Each structure stands twice: as structure tokens, then as C-alpha cells.
Image: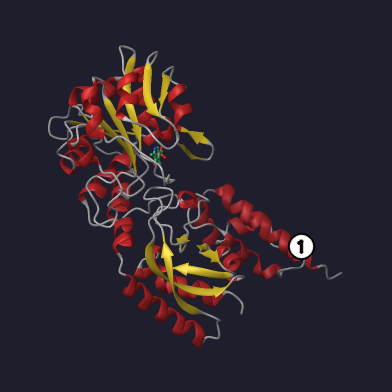
Amino acid sequence: MTDPRRHIPRTDALLADPELAAAAHTLGRDTVKAAITRAQDLARSGRISPGEVAAHALAALPGTASSLRPVLNATGVLVHTNLGRAPLSAAAISAITAAAGPTDVEFDLVTGARARRGRDAMAALAAAVPEAGGVHVVNNNAAALLLCALAMAAGREIVISRGELVEIGDGFRIPDLLRSTGARLHEIGTTNRVHLRDYAEAVGPDTGFILKVHPSNFQVTGFTSTVDTAELVGLGAPVVVDIGSGLLRPHPLLPEEPDAATVLRAGATLVTASGDKLLGGPQAGLLLGAADLVERLRRHPAARALRVDKLTLAALEATLRGPETPVAQSLSADQAELLARAKQLVAELTGAGVDAVAVESSAAVGGGGAPGVELPSAAVSLPERYAAALRARAVVGRVERGRCLLDLRTVAPQQDSTLLAAVLAVPR
Ligand SMILES: *Cc1c(COP(=O)(O)O)cnc(C)c1O
């Protein structure tokens, strides 16, 4: 009898292996046991030898106890919703790590007394937008809108243009979100046009607020008209503006994208925005505007259910005070430099026998803002079959006209070697 299955190492023996024991310590015993079982199964079916079981189990273990895999975004979409939106800066990542244990998020180390939660992140946000009398941070932009509707319009009306009834993504719609609070929507105008007189006729004693929603993921062109924030402030109702992307100040490359400072200067009562789009920070909902109103929102009972955790506060403060974010770097990257990097990568790939070409391409901000804006970029173009093979190696490109493009605008220069290694690892 030479049945190889009799030689497959037993689970308890494998768990005693120093490296697997160390992995069980950091990743959890169940995770390691599951990897061992899978490796034993492979040996049982003869696909690996019994002597390889320990090494195979070790190699199959995830890098961390979470099964979320880090991905290299080579799609050319800066704020990619399915890839977790904004990648955090190194400063934000280390702030999260530092805040992970016990931290003074609600504690004053000088007096030993309770302190206002997240005061430093709020101060950083207030400093970034001095136009705002008050600031508050909640779970995301949807939560910010929810809180506005609950605190300012429950049982009352929100005046909103039909051209701004936006579906955000994954089937979620801003009008449904607002109605879920008990507020009524007073829809005005048409899909393509709304006028100041429509707003003026709609505002009355039942109005909670006027809401303007930035069309951040679509464009309406042709016979269109909208009403600027500045024209709405005289109508006798608070004006809330959902700017979407989270730009705090104007960006020279995105002249059409609204920003918090400009909208507040135009007279908006309150601005809401996401933290993880063009701001380049963690998922969060920013509320900026009239101090008394922001305080009312902060003290609303529902605010407790929408609050952010200490990790978000840490990352947000580091994003606001720290060096340029990866999103900002991607946005301002120079096409000639991107093309030079693409040519460098292609030289190495063709040298290794890969069918690779450096091409000019067009990148985009993504669902997070600036619809229709094309950012001139550069890419490594590969045969289409590379798209799936690279995804298996956690590198995500995009397929265009039968080629797999790895767009360098969303790849940091220090990731080029990782990208190169991943392409070279695909069997030719
Ligand atoms: C993205 C977006 C939202 C939703 O923001 P979340 O932070 O994902 O909740 C709402 N309104 C606009 C205009 C947006 O662009």
C-alpha cells in the first residue's frame, strides 16, 4: 500500500508548525485551519504532494485578518466607487493606525475631563473653509442629507427641481432618501429647465428648505436652465446645497465643479458633501454652514446614529491638514510624464516578449464628480486577455476596443514596479 493520502500531515501537527502557529496568532485559528483544510484536500486529490501541504496553506493565507484585498487601480477612474472611492494618503493611513487603540477622541489629557468628540477634525474642517460658521461630520453625504431632512423638514416640504432628483448608485435615490424622513418633496420645473419663479411660487410657510443637488454623475445638455444659489437666498427659506464631490475650494482643472467655499459665499445656508470623493479622504458626510443650524443638526437625536468613528475622524483630519492626497496627485499629473512612464514600462515588457504598446488615453474623475471631464492620460496597452489575468492578481485595468489598458493616471509612480511584476507574472 503506497496510498499518498496516508502521508498527509494531520491538522494538529500543521498547527504546531512555527510559521502556521504564528499566522494563527495574527489571523485567527479558524482562518489558518481553513487554509490547512484546503491544502490537505489538494494533496488528497493528488494535485500537490503531502510534503507541500504546510507551504501551500501558508501561501494561501491572506495578508491580514480581513479578506478585503488591496487592489491596484489602473482603470483611469480616479474616484472608483467599486474600488472603495478615494485611496487614502499615507498620512491618513498612519493616523488611522495611531488612533486604533485607546485614544483621546472624547477626552482632554490636560484636565482629565470629557472633551468634545472629534474636535480636532472639526477644527481642521473649519480652518479649511473659514466661510462656514459651523461644521459637523456624519457617516456619509447621504447621512448629511438625511439629518437635514429630519431636523429641518420632517412633516414639511423640501423644494427641489425635477432636474435634480438624482439616483446616486446601487439603486439608491436622493428623493426616496428624503421622503423616508417624513418630509414631502415639492417638485418644481422640468427635467431640463427650472426658473427662479418656480422656486418663488413653491416657497411658503410649509417649506423646510430649498435643496439644490449637484448633478455629479450625469449631464443634461441642450435646452437647459438652472438657478444659481445666489438667486435662491432671497426667497425666505434656508438653502441647502449638496455639492457631492467634496471640493472645499475651487479647483483650476475642474471649473464646473462646485466647491463649499464658493457656494457658502453665494449665500447657501448649508452645504453637504462626501469625504471620499474629490476631497480624497475617508467615507464621511460633511456639513458646513450657519453655526446655529449646524449646532441644531449636531444635537438632533438621529445625529448619534449617523456619527463617525474615531478612525474616520483621524483620517479626515490627516487628509485636511496633511500633504496632497493621492486623488489630488492623480488629478494634477502631467500627461507627458505619464506617457514617459508608460514608455518605460513598455520597453521592459516588450523586452520580455509581451505585446505591449504605450498609448495616449483618457481618464475620468468617476462617479464622484465632474461628469464629462476627460483628463488626458497615458496607458500601457495589452492584449485583452490580460484584463482577467491581471484581475486575478488584484490589478484592475479597463478594456477598450479589444485591448486591456493600464491607465497610469490612477497609478502612483512608486507602484510602477508592482504593475510591471504583475504583467510579467501572466503566462505569455
Ligand atoms: C455621491 C453623492 C451623494 C452620496 O454621497 P455618499 O457620501 O456616498 O453618501 C449624494 N449627492 C451627490 C450630489 C453625490 O455626488
> Where's the C terminus, which quadrant?
bottom right
In the depicted structure, whether residue 211 falls above or below residue 60: above
Q: Nearer the viewer, residue 188 or 215?
A: 188
Q: Quadrant of residue 144?
A: top left
Percent across and percent down for residue 351 are 50, 88
Is 199 positioned to the left or the right of 45 in the image? left
Percent across and percent down for residue 107 are 21, 32
Q: Residue at x 39, y 56 (%)?
A: 78
Is 356 positioned to the left or the right of 303 in the image? right
Q: Residue at x 35, y 70 (%)?
A: 413
In the depicted structure, whether residue 281 falls above or below residue 113: below
**Whether residue 301 is visible:** no
Q: Nearer the viewer, residue 22 or 243?
A: 243
> Where's the N terminus, which quadrant?
bottom right
Percent across and percent down for residue 208 are 32, 18
Q: Nearer the viewer, residue 104 or 349?
A: 349
The amino acid on which the numbered mark 1 sits, given as a three-letter code, is Arg
Q: Quadrant of residue 410?
A: bottom left
**Which residue is tagged 1?**
44
Q: Residue at x 36, y 50 (%)?
A: 370
Q: Residue at x 49, y 79 (%)?
A: 357
Q: Residues within 10 Å of mark 1 (few under 14, many from 20)?
A: some
Percent across and percent down for residue 258 are 28, 44
Task: List the single residue furthest toward the bottom.
Answer: 351
